[in-house]
Image: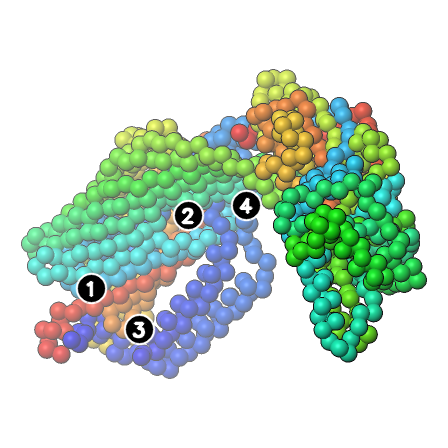
Amino acid sequence: MSNSYRMCTMVCRILLFVLSIVVLGSAQSLLSLQYPFGLPTNTVSGTALSMGGAAAGLPDDFHLLRANPANLGTIDRTIFSGLATVDFTRVVDDDEHSNHAVLTPRQISFSVPVGIIGNLGFSLAKETQAALEFETGPIDLDGGYIGMRELERRGGVTSWLLGWGRSINQWVYLGLAYERAYVTINSTSVSRVQDFPSAVSRDSSAISFGGNGIRFGFLAAFEKIGVGLAYNYMFEGDLDVERSVLRNREETEITEGVDSTGSLQAPPRFTVGLSYQFSQSWAAALDIGLTQWGQYASDKILEKPSRENAASFSAGVRFIPAPGILAPAYWQTIHYRGGAWYSQLPDESSNAYALSLGVGLPLNGGGLIDIIVEAGQRRDDRYDDYREDFASIGVGFNGGRSWQQATEFGE
Amino acid sequence: MACGYTMFDSVHLTENPRIMKRYRYIICALSAALALGLACADSPFDPTTRLGEQIVEDVEPGFLDPDENFKAEQLSIAVSSAFSLLDSIGADVSDDGDLNTLSDGSFVWNIDSLYIGIWNNTKAFSYMQFSGDGFFDAIEAIEEDTGCEIRNAELHLPIEQASEAMLTNIELGLTAELKASNVPFGKDLELIRFEDSLINPQSIVTNDSAVIIQLTFDSLLAAVRQAAVEITDSITDTTSFGFFITSAGSLAAFDAFGVNGPRLMIHATNEQCDQFIAAERANVTFRSFNPDSLDNLPVSDRPTARIAVFGLHMTPLWEALTDTTGREFQNLLIAPLELPGYTADIRGSDSTFRLEYRLHSNRNFQSDPRALDSGDSLGITKAFPETPDPSDSLFIDRWLNLLLDERPDTVYLSLRLFRPETALRLSGGLSLFTRVNWDTPDSLKLKAVFSNVK
């Protein structure tokens, strides 16, 4: 077992310990309250995240199928990839601020080659995050009582993909994935009387959806240029709402449930990706995405965004100091990356942007550990004094083995 | 099958172990320091935020408006009636002296204390029943041994708690019935013969743990036989006999259950031949000297299992659910009701009493005056001082929320003295001898806070 492997193992353990402390916090985004599924999470690999998330047009083993299912066709070995981030948010309103943190496991993916059929891949990801814990200040009531209101929101979209990708010829790759998405939005509105812990009433709603979708991908790599197209479509499905009211006094609970159903049509998403390989050391990528909120409908159960189409742009570069040298120093093998992204959020006046930096630390056996730092801001022009500054520290785990090669050498 | 190498393998061929080791130590130290710092420090992160109110208000209109979400009001609730009832334990007891609900062959449930003596113009009678078959078997067992003769008999009553002085002027009555009859035991106390001849007047021993009443064995045997013959013309295995005990002294409580319950000892000249039989069932009743007066007063009484009941006119509360703008509030967050004034008579080491209170809907109360344990009326218990504290109140919102749909004009508040667990009683806490005489106010204050959660 090499020193680099031991070092990375130890670093990972310590980071996990640190993350386990941070996870005691909670994520916050008041802006996400306005969007039906919460805030979108970038579920690409750590490798892509450090390039601003641009990956649809850049062939890379560790991108697997999240950004573009056709990327599966470029892979000739067994690959796995996972990404988790610690997300820090500073909510700023006028002169005040509050700090929040949460650990977010973003995605885990793997693929296996299946001969002439191509590659099969699987991926599980947290697509959006709806996390909010808001409380009012003390509200003076008659009779000396002090009231308080709280609003809690939990959930988001989690999905898994089962995909296939194959090369059509030496330049063109196609991919297709079946998607199963689960939407869970749990909201609770609380009224309470301070100093009387049991004087609480809660009005809760649990919205859930399980639906099917497809993802189609195309990727063409002409020498130094890569072009990718990815399209994601979710079929209409049933949206269930379970509402309950809890009036609580000591050990007594009264719960009244009111159930209803509707249908959900999630917005389709279209992504175009471009990449250019300047040299063995330098590569750049650009993604342009469009989420078609105009096609979204939820029978007025979830919020209705004001945008018809929400665009997103991401771009990044990658630099490997000495990719072709036989005996480089370790630092010369590290992948240095940087990127930026800008995204229109579902409401007309809101957007977000961020800068990202990352390094990929090579491991024995072909693996890569990504350390990513991302920082940016979300805001809505309707609220002049309000903004959400955010930063993420991410760790990506990537690995792979080329089984065919071993057989070829007869080992 | 062995694994092959990939393009990344080449980059590790020249790793410098010394440099890597140094890196490892540095990173390890930095990470450990960071982790330790985070673990020891207060979290710099907030679980909730109060910022972004405007966004919340836009998404949830009215969320922040106090008038929209809360309404606090102080109401005057008229007391329409005040009286007392015997509760579920009292259902086994009646003031006219009939012990009419004794179950056959076992202790009556819910009776874990027997009372004897005088208490607040009430006289307590205990009844304990023994198997006639067991009694004669015990006698036979002693007489079979040639070295033993019956010396005397004793009634052992383990003391649970005594209110004040020792028992005095114990009276003992004896009766018999057929176990096999399996009919409710019915005896009029006036017809019970309390026979001095049964008791050896020189030998009533009272100590901290028991009262031991020495009986004149010949009189006991004759009385048992006479009582049995009176009802069956013969003494059979199915005959039982029982003692009624009362006293002119202050009230005392005795364990009624199991091995700690009453027992009849038959002593022999050689103590190795002693026999005893345990009581097979027991009950208690009280005779009030002026029962009518109690029924018309709100009295909570522990020994006599009496509960106070107040009828409350709730219309003002239901009207307050709608405010002047027509806004409807459909939930009570908190509703403390003023506690009526009281005079407490507590005879024990604990100067507080614990009250169990419940609210009953008009409908349930009228359908069965004794059905106060209906499923929707779990009680809350709370300790109160011997001298009333004006700030004390009863939180009745849990029941009022249950009645929001029905909205009865009158609801009934029951106040019952809580029966402490045995362990607590043995430790001297929460006296068994407590009576609370409640005032009957014209009205009681109710400070209600409504919310609009529907």
Kindly indicate whether the residues beneath marks 3 and 4 are on one polypeptide chain: no
Circle 2 sits on which residue? A376
- Judging from the image, mark 2 belongs to the subunit labelled A
Disc 2/disc 4 C-alpha distance (Å): 21 Å
Compare residues A210 and B259 and report the one nearer the observer.
Answer: B259
- Name the element at disc 2: strand
In the rendered structure, which disc, 3 or 2, sits on the residue that comes first in sequence?
3
Q: Earlier in the sequence, mark 1 or mark 2?
A: 1
Residue B227 drawn above or below residue B207 = above
The extreme front residue here reads B233
Q: CA distance from mark 1 to mark 4?
A: 43 Å
Label 3 marks which chain's residue? A
Residue under pointer 4: B48
Residue at (69% x, 49% y) in the render: B232
Q: The residue marked by circle 4 belongs to what chain?
A: B
Residue depicted at 42% across the width and 36% down the height: A242
**Numbered mark located on residue A330 in the image:** 3
Percent x, y of residue B195: 86, 51
Picture layout, residue B197 above or below residue A344: below
Corner quadrant of residue A247: top right
Q: Amino acid at mark 1?
A: Thr
Amino acid type, callout 4: Thr
Q: The residue under label 2 is which amino acid type?
A: Gly
